[in-house]
Amino acid sequence: MKALKIFSPATVANVSCGFDVLGFCLDAIGDEMVIRTTEKKGIHLTKIEGCELPFEADKNVAGVSALALIEDADPDFGFEIEIYKKIKPGSGIGSSSASAAGSVFAINELLGKPYSKTELTRFAMKGEVLASQSEHADNVAPAIFGGFTLVKSVNPLEVLQLPTPKDLYAVIIHPQIEIKTAEARAILPKDIRLKDAITQWSNVGSLVHALHTNNYNLLSKSLTDVIVEPHRSKLIPHFEKVRETALLHGALGCGISGSGPSIFSLCHGKEVAQQVAMQIKYVYSTTGIPFEIYTSEINTKGIKII
């Protein structure tokens, strides 16, 4: 192949209790990218639509991750990248990770797939550093692996792919405000109480078990964050109103997607998800804040060639 077009999906990171380690992949929203080989060596961003982003490869997350890959692969040709952004930067559903993961996935395909998914995640993390000043993989891992993932270790990188219950849906509301990941990290406490830590890792363990056993009741009881969400929720207008509405109308759980402002609700079944989305839309429409809302299956494939 000389060129290909991909769908690089949005993702939800943290998943309430799993700060910086848990994430899952969405299907209803994502970027599109076109990557082609070129005789001129290096990485060249030739077209960006949807938002204003740098064309310099070392200043663009897609370029930074791609540069990390070709530095290792050392091909005797280069790559051109076109980005069609559908995920707004600062939305909390993995805008930067879609670009970072998409470029390395596509280049790997054009090279004949010499790298594993874990290796691609490691390259994509370099782009995430540019975006958030932190080397984390809880967005890029589910984009590349699909479904639910747990980042067991960053150094060395170890990603565990978790099962996805078949009838699980996500509702995402994105208030049209921007919260930068670096700023959302800055407000977090440096020390936490042992009692809260015990609660948090208990929830992570039970959430992973719930995914393995299709236990929706246990999943619901596990989607609680006692460490990060109490601080970050203050940055999101009407967060508590959204959560109360989602839970009242049948959501299994509701929490901040990534660093916000997007809020996710996990639901058992499509009909419940549609009802939750309708009720959240009705409630948030009274706030005067513009928003977008999506209902999505969990994307178990990750990035797709289209």
Image (spheres, rainbow, N blue to C red):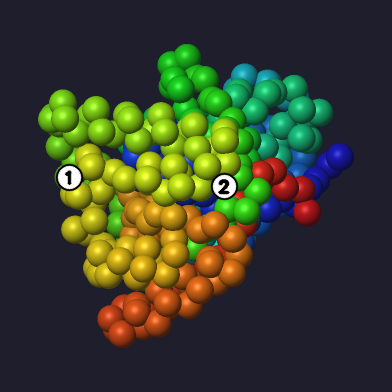
* Amino acid type for the residue under numbered disc 2: Cys
Disc marking residue 25? 2
The three-letter code of the residue at mark 1 reads Ile
When the figure is inspected, residue 37 is found, relative to residue 278, above or below; the finding is: above
Name the image quarter holding the N terminus: top right
Asked whether, in this view, residue 89 is left or right of residue 116, the answer is: left
- On residue 58, the disc is none
Name the N-terminal-most of marks 1 and 2.
Answer: 2
* Residue closest to the eye, 95 or 45: 95
The spot of residue 211 in percent (x, y) is: 54, 38
Q: Is residue 8 left or right of residue 53?
A: right
Callout in the foreground (1, 2): 2
Mark 2, other Cα within 10 Å: few <14 / some 14–19 / many ≥20 = many
Q: Is residue 133 left or right of residue 59?
A: left
For disc 1, the marked residue is 187
Q: Is residue 148 visible?
A: no
Which quarter shows the C terminus?
A: bottom right
- Residue beneath the point at 72% across and 32% down: 108
Compared to residue 195, the image places residue 173 above or below, namely below
Q: Farthest residue toward the top?
A: 156
Q: Where in the figure is residue 69, as x and y percent of width and height?
A: 61, 27
Q: Is residue 297 visible?
A: yes
Q: Residue at x 44, y 37 (%)?
A: 207
